[in-house]
């Protein structure tokens, strides 16, 4: 990482960050985790059914706090088994349901996208997850959760112990593996990046091409696993419903999808960190990162490319750049989705309106031979130059004003006190 001089102006920034680690529970702990996940799923379904019933009868529905009080009263008579789990699991599930309702009404009011009304959760679709709060303790190789106890971590030393404030812990299950995600509030020191701005062009053949020459390959995890997934799906269709062999095949499919997700997530994290953080010691972090504001939902309407576009993860790439640019002192700039980054010649400014998606190189009328992706990245970089110059001028103006204030204050401090003789003259 680039070494930063104190004069560059480090500033403390408070961020929210989650650390996700796989855990190694024993049989007793695994049973407790299943109970908590089941309680959270039950609270969600109970709260959703209650809200729909209340709306049909009165035209209104209660919020998460009211429903949690109602559920606590029903525990004594109808659901005594819920005393075996932490009260935070159903409580946080009702809060998630409340947030799902708010998102639904927000999308309805905004329009232009599917509202997505909350749905009931089924055990058939997975064990799910639960969130807990309260007395949470983190050590180098283990973590303590309420009503569950100490759980062993498979990765030691990843979760920081000092300098963080733990807010909550989300426990989830995926393909037979259990994970804890510790959400905490921590303060980091951020120094403004001083390197040249960069433009990033996203694509399918290559995940990203950066204006400074970096190229990141697209692993195409889903495409490479298609033959294995097809074989597993055919095997699943021949299994008897409710049988043990069918459950074994389902586990195979789940592990295959988990591997695909892990490969994609690992590639995106490495690419975004290499662009923003600049881990090489001889390189500076970019002051501005320019990214296209892609209309991913519109791109997915092309059925020939929908699967390949989904396999890349454009939205996740942008999300990671958004928060990592804050961590490393860079500014993220989004270019308009109608900006002709690929069709615009960076030398003469001519636009090639006949450029096809299959054309990876094209020759401009001015004679320049252009690489499609690199040309787009350089055009995106050019958008950040006016912004950088404006910010440099602002910083220079602030520095000059600080110097003037320092000179004035120094001159004021050098003024001498009136002598005794002059004091006596005016007394």
Image (cartoon, helix red, strand yellow):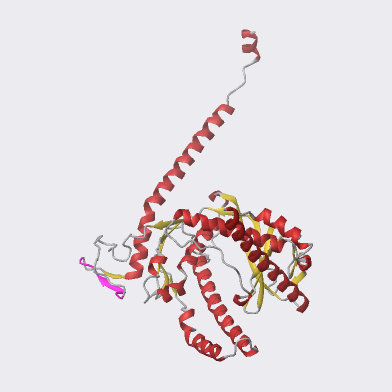
Percent coordinates x, y for residue 180 in the rendering? 67, 69
| Total numbered circles | 0
Of 15 and 213, which appears nearest the observer?
A: 15
- Residue 386 appears in the figure: yes
* Residue furthest to the left: 365
Q: Quadrant of the C terminus?
A: top right
SS assignment for the magenta stretch, majority: loop
Residue depicted at 29% across the width and 74% down the height: 359
Residue 360 counted in the magenta span:
yes
**In this rendering, would 347 be left or right of 335?**
left
- Left or right of 400 on screen, residue 377: left
* Residue 212 visible in image: no
For image coordinates 44% across by 43% down, the residue present is: 394
Horizontally, is 365 left or right of 292 in the view?
Answer: left
Quarter of the image with the N terminus in it: bottom right
Q: Which residues are magenta?
A: 358-365
Residue depicted at 37% across the width and 51% down the height: 386
Q: Position of residue 378 (x, y in %)?
A: 35, 63
Along the viewing direction, whichever of 155 and 204 lies nearer the viewer:
204
| Foreground of the two, 81 or 35 | 81
Check residue 30 for magenta coloring. Answer: no
Q: Is residue 422 left or right of residue 228?
A: right
Q: Camera-side residue: 358 or 208?
A: 358
Residue 68 image offset from top left, x and y in percent: 70, 57
Q: Quadrant of residue 140?
A: bottom right
Identity of the residue furthest to the front in this view: 57
Query: Residue 389 appears at what percent x and percent y?
Result: 39, 49
Image quadrant in which you'd find residue 43: bottom right
């Amino acid at each position: 990482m680039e070494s930063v001089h104190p004069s560059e102006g480090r500033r403390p920034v408070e961020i929210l960050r989650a650390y996700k680690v796989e855990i190694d529970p024993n049989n007793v702990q695994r049973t407790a985790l299943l109970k908590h996940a089941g309680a959270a799923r039950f609270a969600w379904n109970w709260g959703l059914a209650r809200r729909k019933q209340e709306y049909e009868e009165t035209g209104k529905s209660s919020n998460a706090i009211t429903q949690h009080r109602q559920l606590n009263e029903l525990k004594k008579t109808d659901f005594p088994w819920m005393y075996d789990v932490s009260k935070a699991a159903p409580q946080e599930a009702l809060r998630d349901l409340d947030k799902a309702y708010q998102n639904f009404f927000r999308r309805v009011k905004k329009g232009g996208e599917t509202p997505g009304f909350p749905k009931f959760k089924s055990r058939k679709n997975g064990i799910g997850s639960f969130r807990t709060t309260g007395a949470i303790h983190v050590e180098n190789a283990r973590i303590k959760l309420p009503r569950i106890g100490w759980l062993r971590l498979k990765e030691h030393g990843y979760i920081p112990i000092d300098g963080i404030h733990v807010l909550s812990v989300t426990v989830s299950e995926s393909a037979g593996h259990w994970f804890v995600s510790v959400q905490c509030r921590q303060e980091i020191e951020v120094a403004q990046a001083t390197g040249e701005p960069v433009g990033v062009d996203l694509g399918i053949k290559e995940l990203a091409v950066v204006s400074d020459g970096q190229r990141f390959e697209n692993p195409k995890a889903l495409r490479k696993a298609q033959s294995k997934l097809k074989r597993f799906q055919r095997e699943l269709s021949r299994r008897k419903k409710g049988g043990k062999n069918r459950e074994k095949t389902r586990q195979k499919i789940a592990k295959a999808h988990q591997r695909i997700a892990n490969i994609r997530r690992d590639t995106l994290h490495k690419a975004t960190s290499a662009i923003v953080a600049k881990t090489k010691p001889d390189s500076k972090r970019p002051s501005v990162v320019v990214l296209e504001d892609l209309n991913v939902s519109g791109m997915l309407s092309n059925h020939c490319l929908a699967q390949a576009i989904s396999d890349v993860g454009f939205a996740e790439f942008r999300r990671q750049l958004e928060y990592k640019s804050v961590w490393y002192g860079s500014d993220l700039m989004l270019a308009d989705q109608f900006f002709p980054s690929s069709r615009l010649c960076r030398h003469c400014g001519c636009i090639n309106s006949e450029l096809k998606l299959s054309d990876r190189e094209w020759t401009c009328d001015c004679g320049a031979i252009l690489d499609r992706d690199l040309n787009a990245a350089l055009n995106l970089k050019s958008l950040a130059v006016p912004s950088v110059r404006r910010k440099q001028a602002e910083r220079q103006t602030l520095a000059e004003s600080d110097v003037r204030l320092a000179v004035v204050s120094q001159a004021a401090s050098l003024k001498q006190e009136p002598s005794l003789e002059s004091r006596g003259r005016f007394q």
